[in-house]
Image (tube, rainbow, N blue to C red):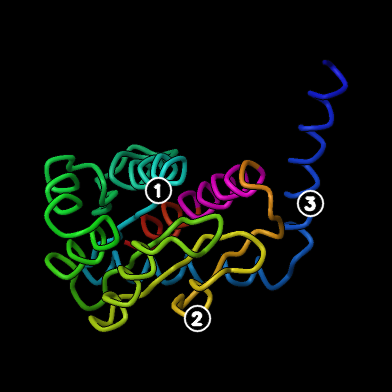
Amino acid sequence: MSEKIKKIITASIETKQMVLQSDELIHTIEKVVDTIVKAFKNGNRVYFCGNGGSAADAQHLAAEFSGRFYTNRKALPAEALHCNTSYMTAVANDYSYDVVYSRIIDGIGEEGDVLVGLSTSGNSKNILNAFETARNKKITTIGFTGSTGGRMKELSDYLINVPSTDTPRIQESHILIGHIICQLVEENYFSKL
């Protein structure tokens, strides 16, 4: 069993090494940091969405902004869109699960906001619909996906496509990249006030 454990850890490290070696991904992460800092400085909000483990990651990253990352500072306006279970279950029941995110973005999203969608396949219908709605409302879209980007590739203003097709390895890298973004946004936003 210890060899299996080491093999899984090695696979995680190898995926992160591929992220590290991708100048394109590093450059995209830099642009995402700048975009989110600009949105916060302009009084806009950052919304997160995902399904399953990616919903947990979305909630985690939203909390890093609305709570804190490293420094004691004011809260930043960020939230995960799935946290209102009454809303989620009502819309899924009355309409369709495919519209749970697009409907709320249509209701509360404003031009200049940012929507971050996490989907390892890049093909989650409810996130695709939300990105289409966001695009119509001039909300910046940031897709966190696996290697191909799936259908989110065409709908993402910024695509962070982890070079893997293995869901757990992709999600581990999503959290690494998300933490990098949270740290750098916090540093840049609060150093420029």
In the rendered structure, which amino acid carries the disc numbered 3?
Gln
Is the C-beta separation of discs 2 and 3 under 8 Å?
A: no
Is the C-beta separation of discs 3 and 1 under 8 Å?
A: no
Q: How many C-alpha atoms fall within 10 Å of the one at disc 1: few (<14), some, or many (≥20)?
A: some
Q: CA distance from mark 2 to mark 3?
A: 26 Å
Quadrant, the N terminus? top right
Residue in the image at 26% along x and 60% along y: 101
Q: Earlier in the sequence, mark 3 or mark 1?
A: 3
User: Where is residue 108 shown, x and y percent of the image?
Assistant: 14, 65
User: Where is residue 109 shown, x and y percent of the image?
Assistant: 19, 68
In the rendered structure, which amino acid carries the disc numbered 2?
Glu
Q: Judging from the image, what secondary structure is the residue with disc 3 in?
A: helix
Residue range (magenta) = 169-183
Residue in the image at 73% along x and 70% along y: 23
Q: Quadrant of residue 18?
A: bottom right
Residue for badge 1 = 51
**Foreground tag (2 vs 3):** 2
Residue for badge 2 = 154
Residue for badge 3 = 17
User: Where is residue 152 shown, x and y percent of the image?
Assistant: 48, 71
Q: Earlier in the sequence, mark 2 or mark 1?
A: 1
